[in-house]
Amino acid sequence: MTINWVGRFPRQRERERKEDPMEKRRSCYYRHHQLLYAVILSFMLWSLMVSFGGRRVLLNPGSDSCIGRYVYVHRLPSRFNHYLIENCESLTRGTDKGNMCSYMQNMGLGPAISHSQSQGLFTHNNTWYATNQFMLELIFHNRISKYDCLTNHSSLASAIFVPFYAGLDISRFLWLSNLTLRDSSARDLLQWLSNTPEWKRMWGRDHFLVSGRIAWDFRRQFDNASYWGSKFRFLPESINMSMLAVEASSWNNDYAIPYPTSFHPSKDAHVFHWQTKIRHQKRPYLYTFTGAPRPELEGSIRGKIIEQCRASNVCKFVDCSYGVETCDDPIHVIKVFESSVFCLQPSGDSYTRRSIFDSMLAGCIPVFFHPGTAYSQYKWHLPKNRTKYSVYIPVKDVKQWNVNVEKVLLAIPQGEVFAMREEVIKLLPNIIYAHPASKLDSFQDAFDLAVKGMLERIEKVREAMRSGRDPSVGFADEDHYKYTFSQDYS
Ligand SMILES: *[C@@H]1O[C@H](CO)[C@@H](O)[C@H](O)[C@H]1NC(C)=O
Ligand SMILES: *[C@@H]1O[C@H](CO)[C@@H](O)[C@H](O)[C@H]1NC(C)=O
Ligand SMILES: *[C@@H]1O[C@H](CO)[C@@H](O)[C@H](O)[C@H]1NC(C)=O
Ligand SMILES: *[C@@H]1O[C@H](CO)[C@@H](O)[C@H](O)[C@H]1NC(C)=O
Ligand SMILES: *[C@@H]1O[C@H](CO)[C@@H](O)[C@H](O)[C@H]1NC(C)=O
Ligand SMILES: *[C@@H]1O[C@H](CO)[C@@H](O)[C@H](O)[C@H]1NC(C)=O
């Protein structure tokens, strides 16, 4: 089900024109008119630039590095974003936390961890925070508020950002059996959006939003309280929009972006410093698993992994069963990961885990067991060639699983291990969210790559519309292969 965006028809017309005997005479006529058009067009463009002015006065459009990158951020009624922050006491369900409010400090990064609290892990203050994964919506909104190509003129914008805190919002309703209530914010938001002039331009196909929860939380397929989630992403307006989320569903208009980690550098130097530190780190353990068993989940391989890890003297197991605090302590988590060569990343309640990014941050090579854990997800942020930075042990059926993880890992030549770790270290900027109050100069971080990916995607849709094709073709289709053990990842 690949979508062919490359239009064949315009090229065909071009060929027909060249073969036309009238062509020569016509092209002479064209040349005179082209000059006139060029003059008129330049004047129109010039008046456009002058009247829009703004931060960049552009007399020469070629010099504007923001062309094609302008983003317009909707100013939504507060109930869709700020209200949720102001009423943070109500957002505790499903988080194991008594109170989420402290995580909203520092533009959503959470409480700062000082150098003295870090037990020697890092030396720079204001680079590490106790960041909660559900705060991605707030972090992203704060980052985009400082984006260098913002515009207040939506007609100039290549993309429209909708700062709806979708995950925080739905966390208030996910466990309610009243479906009208569960879907209420989604319906209100879509009604608001579809009444704006911005909507009419591309029927929402240039709109995008971000979720700190997995995309499945908005994909309830049947109106039955026993099914999980809201119906947000199946509502007609929402189908025309794109969503970035920490885990994408199997529909094409969802895109995965990294979970936030605890590292939020504000300078390039912080990144270089950390990369150097983890490159030279001593790693006494061959591999690590940090997580909880999932005995209630049928087919979960976590039990097997824990069994093997416990029986090994080169594996470190950190038990994150309910109530164990250490797994929530960023210092402790990073210390474990940086003392290990490989980090096992089996699926849990969903395909992906924040731990993938925490472990890569510590220079630990990830080991995946399912294509949906990373390879079919973070396509804008991780290399296409999985062997460069990770180990893959596909487990299609846990009942038939007879792999000895330790043997597999020990069989990898030292040179390859070294090269993989170097790749993980090189990838580090791609998977972190820099401090929203600043911007890295020599790196594109997870946010930059997400915006770039989104702009490219929207541009393709715009191109399709311009050349008269139906933009809905393939836009929100279900990709059945995403979570299967396909050839691509064999
Ligand atoms: C880091 O912050 C702590 C606590 O706020 C302070 O005592 C310390 O001097 C700071 N260290 C540096 C290197 O700025
Ligand atoms: C857009 O308008 C708001 C409110 O008037 C203003 O604070 C902001 O600086 C403007 N942004 C740009 C990019 O011009
Ligand atoms: C569900 O919630 C809506 C909106 O609050 C309310 O009008 C309706 O009566 C509720 N339905 C049930 C079955 O409780
Ligand atoms: C909802 O789903 C459950 C489980 O699939 C089923 O037992 C129940 O009959 C369904 N209810 C309705 C109203 O369809
Ligand atoms: C979605 O986009 C299509 C055009 O691609 C448009 O016809 C349709 O009305 C849009 N849906 C809504 C609800 O705006
Ligand atoms: C993928 O990366 C590995 C390791 O760097 C390399 O040996 C292999 O040739 C690459 N495959 C492709 C298709 O580029």
Image (cartoon, helix red, strand yellow):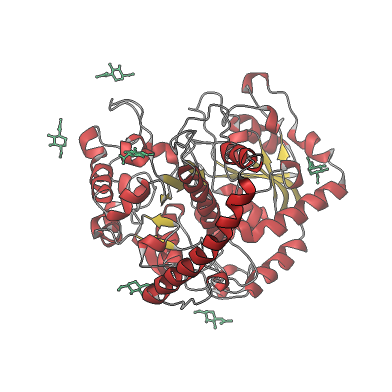
Left or right of residue 401, residue 409 in this image: right
Q: Nearer the viewer, residue 424 or 409?
A: 424
- Please give the name of the residue rendered at 68% of the width and 38% of the height, measured from the top-left corner: 309
- Please give the name of the residue rendered at 45% of the width and 72% of the height, measured from the top-left corner: 43
Indicate the position of residue 323 as horizontal and vertical percent values: 45, 46
Q: Nearer the viewer, residue 304 or 442?
A: 442
Q: Nearer the viewer, residue 332 or 104?
A: 104
Indicate the position of residue 15 as horizontal and vertical percent values: 65, 39
> Looking at the picture, does residue 372 appear above or below residue 414?
above
Quarter of the rendered structure image containing ligand 1? bottom right
- Please give the name of the residue rendered at 50% of the width and 62% of the height, measured from the top-left corner: 69
The quadrant in which the C terminus is found is top right
Indicate the position of residue 326 as horizontal and vertical percent values: 53, 53
Q: Quadrant of residue 377?
A: top right
Question: Total of numbered circles in the picture?
Answer: 0
> Looking at the picture, does residue 308 appear above or below residue 438?
above
- Please give the name of the residue rendered at 53% of the width and 26% of the height, measured from the top-left corner: 480
Indicate the position of residue 172 as horizontal and vertical percent values: 28, 46
Residue 109 seen by the camera: no
Left or right of residue 416, residue 130 in this image: left
Residue 334 seen by the camera: yes
> Looking at the picture, does residue 64 appear above or below residue 197?
below
The quadrant in which the N terminus is found is top right
